[in-house]
Amino acid sequence: QHPHTHTRTHCSPVKFGIHKHERIVAVRGFSKTLGTQSWRVGYLVAAPNTVINLMRVSDPIYICVPFLQHAVAEYLNTHYEDFQAHKRASEELMRGNWKLLSPAFCAAFGWTAIEPEGTMYGMFAHRESTDLEACKKALMAGVGICPGGMFWWNETPCTGYLRIHCGVTREKAQKIADMLCVCLCLC
C-alpha cells in the first residue's frame, strides 16, 4: 500500500444491494481506462426509483445514449487496432513526461517523487508546512500543481503530498522542466 492512500477499508455500496437503498448512487467511469481522458464515458447504478427521479432532471441522458458514448462504442467496434495504438502512444507520452518532469520537480523543490501506478498523474511527497505552501512555491516558479488534501476524506491542511498532471504535450513538459531548471539556478 502506498503512503498516499488512507488505511480505511474500501466498501462499495453496490455490495450491499444498491437496488434497496434509494439514497445511494454509484457513478463509475472508464474514460481513463480507455485512454480517453476528459471524455467522461461511464455509467450509473442506482435503485429503480432513484433512476426515475434522476431521469426527471436529466431526461435526455437516459432516453438515448449520449452521442459521444455511441461514437466511442462505434469506434472501438470498428477501429480497435487504432484505439490500441492511441492507448500505447498516450501511455508512452505520459510515462515519458513523468520521467522528464519528476527529476525537475525534485531538483527544484526538494520533493520526493512517488512512482505512479498509472500514467495520468504523478505525486510527490513534500516537507512544506502545508500543501498550500508547497503549491505557492510551485506557482512562484510558474508551475500549477494540485494539493494532496483534495484527495483525502478529511480536510487535512498538510497531507505532505502533491499531484501533477502528466497528460500534456512533450513540448510543454520540456518547457516546464526547463523553467524549473532556470528557477533552480536563480534560487
Image (cartoon, rainbow, N blue to C red):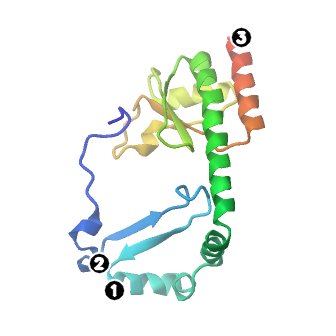
Instruction: Find disc 2 in the rendering and name its residue.
Output: 22
Asked which quadrant contains residue 99, the reply is: top right
For the residues marked 1 and 3, what is the alpha-carbon distance in whole angstroms? 61 Å
> Which mark, by number, is residue 68?
none
Q: On screen, 6 above or below 40?
A: above
Please state which of residues 144 and 70 is positioned toward the viewer in this rendering. Answer: 70
For the residues marked 2 and 3, what is the alpha-carbon distance in whole angstroms? 58 Å
Q: Position of residue 181 (x, y in %)?
A: 71, 18
Residue drawn where x is 63% and y is 70% of the image:
72
> Which mark, by number, is residue 49?
1
Instruction: Find disc 3 in the rendering and name its residue.
Output: 185
Q: Earlier in the sequence, mark 1 or mark 3?
A: 1
Please state which of residues 137 and 18 is positioned toward the viewer in this rendering. Answer: 18
Q: Amino acid at mark 3?
A: Cys
Q: Amino acid at mark 2?
A: Glu
- Residue extending farthest front: 81
Q: On screen, 154 above or below 50?
A: above
Side of 156 relative to 139 (left or right): left
Mark 3 Cα within 10 Å, few/some/many (few <14, many 20+)? few
Q: Secondary structure at mark 3?
A: helix
**Labels 1 & 3 near each other (Cβ < 8 A):** no
User: Which corner quadrant holds the C terminus?
Assistant: top right
Q: Amino acid at mark 1?
A: Asn
Q: Earlier in the sequence, mark 2 or mark 3?
A: 2
User: Which corner quadrant holds the N terminus?
Assistant: top left
Q: Position of residue 53 (x, y in %)?
A: 40, 85
Q: Position of residue 31 (x, y in %)?
A: 55, 60
Residue drawn where x is 74% and y is 37% of the image:
170
Residue drawn where x is 46% and y is 37% of the image:
148
Mark 1 Cα within 10 Å, few/some/many (few <14, many 20+)? some
Q: On screen, 134 above or below 149?
A: above
For the residues marked 1 and 2, what is the alpha-carbon distance in whole angstroms? 7 Å
